Amino acid sequence: MSSVIRQIPLDTATRHHAHDYHQVVIGLHGRAEFEIEGLGGVISALSGCIVPANHVHYYAGTGDNRQLILDLSTRSAALTGPQQDLARLFDAPRFFTLDDPLKRYMGFLLEELNYSTPDPQQGDRLAATLLGCLHARLACKAKASPSRLDMVRLDRFIEAHLASRFSVADLARVACLSEAHFRHCFRQQTGLTPWQYVRRRRLEAARRLLDDSRLPLAEIAALTGFSNQSALSHACRQAYGQPPSRLRRRFASSSRRNDDALRCTSLT
């Protein structure tokens, strides 16, 4: 699929969708509102946003508006071969404002679109130049102020979904990052892969239930996301060197000793 550059107004009613290609939206006239996987912002003339592939986004134009939209397949010539580094531009959704040189390039791009005959390769060339300029500017900003993952937000999501199946892609969406970039950032920040971290959180939750409840082991396994009691037992042996039944008995014995000690103290 070649790069497609189009100029359209956005509907003033709020719409939402996701698609398997990347998108860059730049305001030409009027305003538009976007929310991309929880990241919201407003686009006015000569500001824009980056919408990575497969990210659900809500959008709506305000009154009389017109937007320049670049549709970019992940296999587009503008993002492959010598230009493959430009794909990093779509690691995460973001909003941006064009500086003066890019505003001048936008003027040239619009004139070129009106002047030239339809040519898919020309669309790729124009898109690659714009993407290269954006990448240079936004990459510098990212290096100057590196962002950290919001682990509190991720922990809340994991805690709320412990009993259900979810994927690394789901965690990446919570962090508003592409899956590949999320995996990289997660490992850098925590020293663990996302699944190692989720497994540890599941085990911690199971251990609390073993200590604080008399629930059957099969129910604890289901509540903490293990496929069955056997999977929970295997995970406990790996992490704690004991099966869950032994961990529970050890905690019960410790509790009884503490209770006995308290009773003796009260008698004296």
Image (spheres, rainbow, N blue to C red):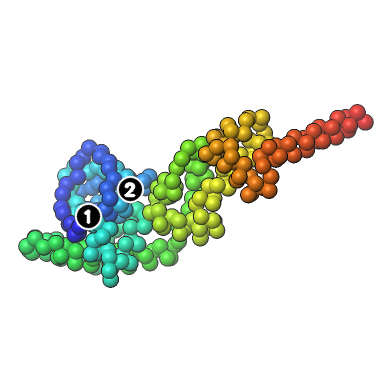
Spot occupied by residue 45 in the image (x, y as percentages of width and height)? 22, 54
Residue 66 picture location, percent across and down: 17, 49
Judge whether 66 appears above or below 247 on screen: below
Residue at the spot x=78%, y=36% of the render? 253
- Residue 230 occupies quadrant: top right
Image quadrant where one finds the C terminus = top right
Badge 1: residue crowd in 10 Å (few <14, some 14–19, many ≥20): many
User: SS for tag 1?
Assistant: strand
Q: Which residue is mark 2?
A: 55
Within 10 angstroms of label 2, few (less than 14), some, or many (20 or more) residues? many
Image quadrant where residue 112 sits: bottom left
Mark 1: amino acid: Asp
Q: Residue furthest right?
A: 268
* Residue 53 location (% of width, % of height): 30, 52
Split into 4 quadrants, where in the image is the N terminus? bottom left
Query: Does dot 2 land on a helix, a strand or a loop?
Result: loop
Task: Specify which label sits upstream in the sequence, 2 or 1.
Answer: 2
- Per the image, the residue denoted by label 1 is 71
In the image, which disc is placed on residue 15?
A: none
In this rendering, would 111 be left or right of 262? left
